Image (cartoon, helix red, strand yellow):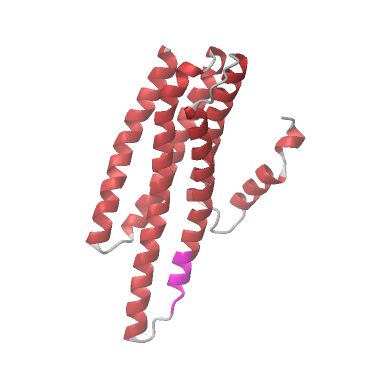
Amino acid sequence: MTATEFATPSAARYTDLLAAATSTPGGGSASAVAGALAASLVEMVLGISAEKRVETAASPELAQARQHRARLLALGAEDEAAYGGYMNALRLPKTTDDEKAARKQALETATITAANVPLAIAGECLELLRLIIPATPQSLPALRSDLETAAHLAHGAANGALVMVDVNLSGLKNPEAKTPLSATYDALQRDLSAALVTALAAISAD
């Protein structure tokens, strides 16, 4: 890809939007895109490796990486929509007691959604990290550095998404909603660290 090709609307336009002085796209969307880039690298490695080895059977890991990429891009859009939903709830009237109650409930619902989306982004990145392990033996040695880059990208993307989760959890008042989300958050933090270590070990050992 040339410099001109890299500065295409799909790449340059997104970075322009991200750099703009607007609230969206933001950290959640950027994390999803970073995760999608990691999935793209895994796809590339498996695709080239299959062609070089003249393999006729389709790799299930290649199909899974493609699915992760599509899902992460979709989650990036969902994250922007979730933020919009929260802002809409914030603008609701709060003059009467009924309006205040309705606004409070709308904000709680919007905050839960705003936490669930980046949780899903982090979860998708975790599954991508785990996918790198069976993908490694199928990859050419010359492309292992790309897999290693994908692992670090996926891990960083997941942690970026968890930062957004943490912000939203701090705004939740209802323990019935907050407790399970916090438990998922804690589990993802633990599992992501282990998955990165395992993926990197697989890449360096094979």
Q: Main secondary structure of the magenta part?
A: helix
Residue 85 picture location, percent across and down: 47, 65
Chain part drawn in magenta: 85-92
Q: Is residue 141 above or below residue 174?
A: above
Residue 202 picture location, percent across and down: 40, 18
User: Is residue 91 rendered magenta in the image?
Assistant: yes
Q: Is residue 66 left or right of residue 118?
A: right
Residue 92 in view in this figure:
yes
Q: Quadrant of the N terminus?
A: top right
Q: Is residue 74 left or right of residue 192?
A: right
Q: Viewer-proximal residue, 72 or 105?
A: 72
Query: Residue most toward the right?
Result: 4
Q: Quadrant of the C terminus?
A: top left
Q: Viewer-proximal residue, 69 or 184?
A: 69
The residue shown at (38%, 48%) is 119
Residue 25 picture location, percent across and down: 55, 53
